Amino acid sequence: MRKIAHLSDLHFGTERKEIVEGLVKDLQLVEPDVIVISGDLTQRARTRQFKNAQVFLQRLEPPVVIVPGNHDIPLFDLFRRFLMPLTRYQKYITEDLSPVYLDDEILVYGVNSARSLTWKEGRISVEQMQEMHKALCEVPDSVFKIVVTHHPFIPPPEDEGIRLVGRSKKVLKIVAECGIDLLLAGHLHHGYSGDIRPYYPETKNSIIVAQAGTAISRRTRKKPNVYNLLTVDPLHMTITIKEWNGHQFFKRGTTFYHKEREEWRIGQE
Ligand SMILES: [Fe+2]
Ligand SMILES: [Fe+2]
């Protein structure tokens, strides 16, 4: 069994300092095996914001898998936006735009879905899909496989009109071939989870999506500050929402999944 802390949309520049401290403390207590950060580390891709995100990352002990979000590409500085979109991200956060964490139980594979042109809506290129296919399929199916993007693969339950990551159908066709169980993303500042199949009827594989809200930012869109704590093994998965209550992160609720005949089903512990 592996424990994963999934943070998203930190938006340094709009962070609340007391929540940053609460988050670092909570992560020390829960001791995840790996921390995933699904993009938007900064509010406006400014140097100071990246430096503050870098200081935060240096305080985390477990391995971290990070992908950029649209806010990590400058929006108004058109020179940087189109000619050097992720230069600061790569300088202060990580050079690696296809980060991987692999041990004998889990694979976490990060994909950069942030784009200069379609700044708000992300997409995944054909080349990335080919790389993804190779990397995911060469790992045996006994390993629990997770893909991380910034942009979502399924909409929130109450807002089904929302734009999803570009080429999502093609990507799912590829990842389904390689036996993926879980997709992690953010961007909407709204935590929810569910199976992909109602939204992709042509995909037969049961794959669960877990979306994380914003962990530390003031940009909460009237939702609480949260992060997700997941446990995974080949037949079980739990997704616990940890919510900031003004003093600490508490467990707001847990969704339990178990795998039965190749299908992830919601059930009791
Ligand atoms: Fe965001
Ligand atoms: Fe975003």
Image: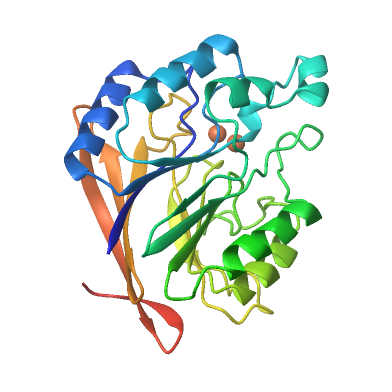
Whether residue 238 is visible here, answered yes or no, is no
* Residue 77 x, y percent position in the rendering: 76, 14
Image position of 180 with respect to 49: above or below: below
Of 210 and 148, the residue lying toward us? 148
Look at the image and tell me in which quarter the N terminus lies.
bottom left
Image position of 27 with respect to 219: above or below: below
* Residue 215 x, y percent position in the rendering: 39, 34
The residue lying at 60 percent from left, 31 percent from top is 95
Q: Specify the quadrant of the image occupied by residue 133.
A: bottom right
Instruction: Report how many numbered discs are placed on residues in the image.
Output: 0
Q: Residue furthest bottom?
A: 261
Image position of 4 with respect to 87: above or below: below
Of 118 and 50, the residue lying toward us? 50
Whether residue 203 is visible here, answered yes or no, is yes
* Residue 216 x, y percent position in the rendering: 38, 28
Left/right of residue 85 with respect to residue 155 in the rendered view: right
Ligand 2 appears in which quadrant? top right
Look at the image and tell me in which quarter the C terminus lies.
bottom left
The residue lying at 36 percent from left, 35 percent from top is 225
Left/right of residue 228 with respect to residue 177 in the rendered view: left
Q: Residue furthest top?
A: 48
Left/right of residue 127 with respect to residue 91 in the rendered view: right
Left/right of residue 247 with respect to residue 77 in the rendered view: left
